[in-house]
Image (spheres, rainbow, N blue to C red):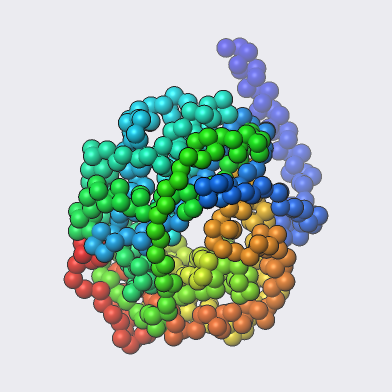
Amino acid sequence: MKRFYLTFILIVSIFFYATCAFAQNPFPLTNPDKLRYHPLQFNLPKVERMVLNNGIVLYIFEDHELPLVNISVVIRTGSMYDPENKEGLAELTGTVMRTGGTDTMTGDAIDEELEFLASSVGVSVNMESGSFTCSVFKKDLDTGLKIFSEILIHPVFEENKFLLAKNLKLEEIRRISDDPEKLTFREFTRLLYHGNPRGKLASTSSIKNILRDDLLQFHTRFFYPANVMMAISGDITKEEAVSKINQYFGMWHASGKQDEIPYPAENHGGSTFYLEKDIPQSIIITGYFAPAKGTSNFYPFTVLDFIVGSGSFRSRIFEEIRNDLGLAYSVGSFYRGKSKYGVFGTYAITKTASTGKVLSLIQAIIDDVIARGVSESELALAKKSIDNSFIFSFLSADQIAYQQLMAEYDKLPEDYLVTYRNRIEKVSRADIKRVGLNYLPPEKALILVVGNESASDQLLPLFGKVNKIKGELSYDR
């Protein structure tokens, strides 16, 4: 105890004298914006690409720093291929592939084995793709690849796991109304893609229509080698990678069918929608179709998005609406460039009384960028931030391999990753005004507001006709 008190007194004394010394001779504080340092140097690491005899596209990247091997698989599938009245099938197929066992192992046995190996297998099926991942220690690579390959090639969709996944999805859909933000973005997706397969969303009735045989048929239709792209990275040589992938996937010679899905058309024509929900705040989303990824307009639009709202504290929407006026709990923008189209949107969560004002401010900020342009300081900050973000998206071996795989999956130009930074750097203020004028005129905006009746009343004087979403919500249809 005596030693404890002596140690405590010593620590307090050091802190006291250090504080006094700092008060007498404080260190000068430098504005972070004035810091100067050498430009980040970045050369895209080379990833080996090859096509196996059965059609699988394989990317290989060696990194022997850790005894780990990571495998990523991307399948050309997604919820946009869901059959009519069975929306949700793609997602359920992915879920039960992971949980529902294979020809040689039950789903529970797979979970136990992966846990014992400290390995993981992940599944994600979204609107336009399906992703499967496996992470395993090098010493357990054969066991991990055996399980992973059987999940992809020979799933059996155990009935009990299928029913469990189906019931969980039904419960998730029933609870959407309890989460206003999730509800808003779901309705926004449905409205934005109206008339396109991407706008078909799972409902309680569509999930109830799905049978186990539907999962088997969906798997047969989309899971075949020529529809698979794979990246393997980590503690493995090129020769080992080719040998192991051929060992576990080389005998896979199935074929399937994939229909062409039309790309979305700009069919909302400046519409304003209101969904009534008795909550004390409003959730506002505005949406536009935007440039496709990798096109010449993609780069200036990326910079525009950063300046308008995705640049967090330094973005115009955040600074004006949240910092200066304190009118929003959450506010910003997003831009998702796809292979043939893009989507840009802004969002805000504000108290009901300020619904109309916040929506007007968002539109005024966008209009100002188009009419008056951006400043040189805004442009420089955006370029530097985007450049840094791009570089730091290649921190690990699996990120390096996956980024290059996805560039091919998205059908981007071969030099997309190599020239990305240079193309961002060349963006001018005139480029930003040009793309803003082309893609963000007010008459093209899709506006959705979710809130109580007072919020709806504020929209009428601003936008004239407001389309009220009536009857049962889309999750019950």
In this view of the protein, which residue sits in the foreground, 77 or 445? 77
Q: Residue furthest top?
A: 2
Q: Quadrant of the N terminus?
A: top right
Residue 287's quadrant in the figure? bottom left
In this view of the protein, which residue sits in the foreground, 80 or 192? 80
* 377 sits left or right of 363 in the view: right
User: Which residue appears at 48% of the width and 42% of the height?
Assistant: 133
Where does the image place residue 360, in percent across and percent down from the top left? 44, 79
Where does the image place residue 96, in percent across and percent down from the top left? 32, 43
Classify 333 as above or below 249: below
User: Which residue appears at 56% of the width and 50% of the height?
Assistant: 57
Where does the image place residue 119, in percent across and percent down from the top left? 48, 31
User: Which residue appears at 57% of the width and 67% of the height?
Assistant: 293
* 18 sits left or right of 463 in the view: right
* 61 sits left or right of 244 in the view: right
Q: How many marks?
A: 0
